[in-house]
Image (cartoon, rainbow, N blue to C red):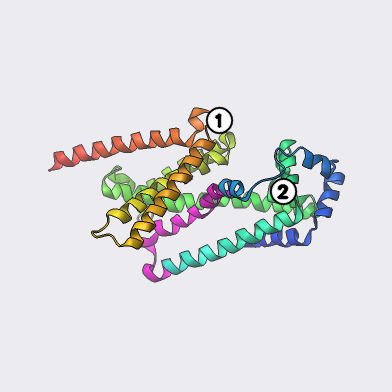
């Protein structure tokens, strides 16, 4: 975490210290592109705040979903009721601050039209935060930042190991998976098979993102969260009788928001191949879940 914050601090510092004119000069000297010409190639030249918010929300949701890893390992935390709640609240505050400063720093140095234009010209290497500011950084620092980013990408394995392995371990304890996945290492008390399976699936997901892009994973993950939100809102209406008015309003608001969000994700992906659409993947997951549920129900009946 400290390493990520240090890298973010360097980007934030350079972003706020770099006026747009420096970036325009770097475009001309490094890529031999005139800023006005790059901006003219942008597919859009004006965006309403509603459209921008709707486009950014899925990415924002995805950016905060890592907090679920903290709750997945809550049973291993000392004084979890106190430390876990404070840790999650502190993490939200830190991440929100970093995300906000990071975004303002990038767009302080680089107009968004320039980024859209570079993407239209297929200069995708330069549309990342480090790629953009690397044009105005000294050569040695730009190269070093690329190394740092590579290390941060590898770091994404850690939450996969830590969080997903605990799901597999819990499912094995509940009988959803074979009991062997609940076995722990004799010395380290870690779920070895669960960690191994998480490593394999995590590696497969990262390789898949090279071909399908990260947007596919973002849409699918956010759609699954929206389904959970909808069920939470429904649960607020059915949790007790009589239902307080404030709970009715809150439940309806959550259900309405998750429905609108789900529809926007589905409609926004209609132009892709069928297997890349999150709704198709959601149907596949739902069918698989029903098969698992029926298998466990029949086995439970046999045990009785």
Q: Is residue 82 magenta?
A: yes
Q: Which residue is mark 2?
A: 112
Position of 176 compared to 123: left or right?
Answer: left
Comparing 259 with 294, the one in front is 259
Which class describes the residues within 10 Å of circle 2: few (<14), some (14-19), or many (20+)?
Answer: some
Q: Mark number for residue 61?
A: none
> Start and end of the magenta stretch?
56-84
Identify the image quadrant of the N terminus: bottom right
Which class describes the residues within 10 Å of circle 1: few (<14), some (14-19), or many (20+)?
Answer: few
Question: Residue 43, how many percent across, how many down?
Answer: 70, 37
Instruction: Single out the residue that lies furthest toward the front.
Output: 245
Residue at point 76% right, 37% down? 41
Position of 151 compared to 92: left or right?
Answer: right
Instruction: Single out the residue that lies furthest toward the top.
Output: 273
Q: Is residue 183 visible?
A: no
Question: Residue 258, how many percent across, how many down?
Answer: 44, 48
Position of 139 compared to 235: left or right?
Answer: right
Question: Residue 251, how many percent across, how many down?
Answer: 36, 55
Element under disc 1: loop
Q: Quadrant of residue 115?
A: top right
Position of 11 compared to 163: left or right?
Answer: right
Q: Could you tell which of marks 1 and 2 lies nearer the N-terminus?
A: 2
Comparing 123 with 112, the one in front is 112
Element under disc 2: helix
Q: Is residue 254 visible?
A: yes
Q: Label 1 vs label 2: CA separation?
A: 25 Å
Q: Which residue is mark 1?
A: 271
The secondary structure making up most of the magenta span is helix
Instruction: Single out the residue that lies furthest toward the left.
Output: 304
Against 72, residue 115 (above or below) is: above
Against 88, residue 274 (above or below) is: above
């Amino acid at each position: 975490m400290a390493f990520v914050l240090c890298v973010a601090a360097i980007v934030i510092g350079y972003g706020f210290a770099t006026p747009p004119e420096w970036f325009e000069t770097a475009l001309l000297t490094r890529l031999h592109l005139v800023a006005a010409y790059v901006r003219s190639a942008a597919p859009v030249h004006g965006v309403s705040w509603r459209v921008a918010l709707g486009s950014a929300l899925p990415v924002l949701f995805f950016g905060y979903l890592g907090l679920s890893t903290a709750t997945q390992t809550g049973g291993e935390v000392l004084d979890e009721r106190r430390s876990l709640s404070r840790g999650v609240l502190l993490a939200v505050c830190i991440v929100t601050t970093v995300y906000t400063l990071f975004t303002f720093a990038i767009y302080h140095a680089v107009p968004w039209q320039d980024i859209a234009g570079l993407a239209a010209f297929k200069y995708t290497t330069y549309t990342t935060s480090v790629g953009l500011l690397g044009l105005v950084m000294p050569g040695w620092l730009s190269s070093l930042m690329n190394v740092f980013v590579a290390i941060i990408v590898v770091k994404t394995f850690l939450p996969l190991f830590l969080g997903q392995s605990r799901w597999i371990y819990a499912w094995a304890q509940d009988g959803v998976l074979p009991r062997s996945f609940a076995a722990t290492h004799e010395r380290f008390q870690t779920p070895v098979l669960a960690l191994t399976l998480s490593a394999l699936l995590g590696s497969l997901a990262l390789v898949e993102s090279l071909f399908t892009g990260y947007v596919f994973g973002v849409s699918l993950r956010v759609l699954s969260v929206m389904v959970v939100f909808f069920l939470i809102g429904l649960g607020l209406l059915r949790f007790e009788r009589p239902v307080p008015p404030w709970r009715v309003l809150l439940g309806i608001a959550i259900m309405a928001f998750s429905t609108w969000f789900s529809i926007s994700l589905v409609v926004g992906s209609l132009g892709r191949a069928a297997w890349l659409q999150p709704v198709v993947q959601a149907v596949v997951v739902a069918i698989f879940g029903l098969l698992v549920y029926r298998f466990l129900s029949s086995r439970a009946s046999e045990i009785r």
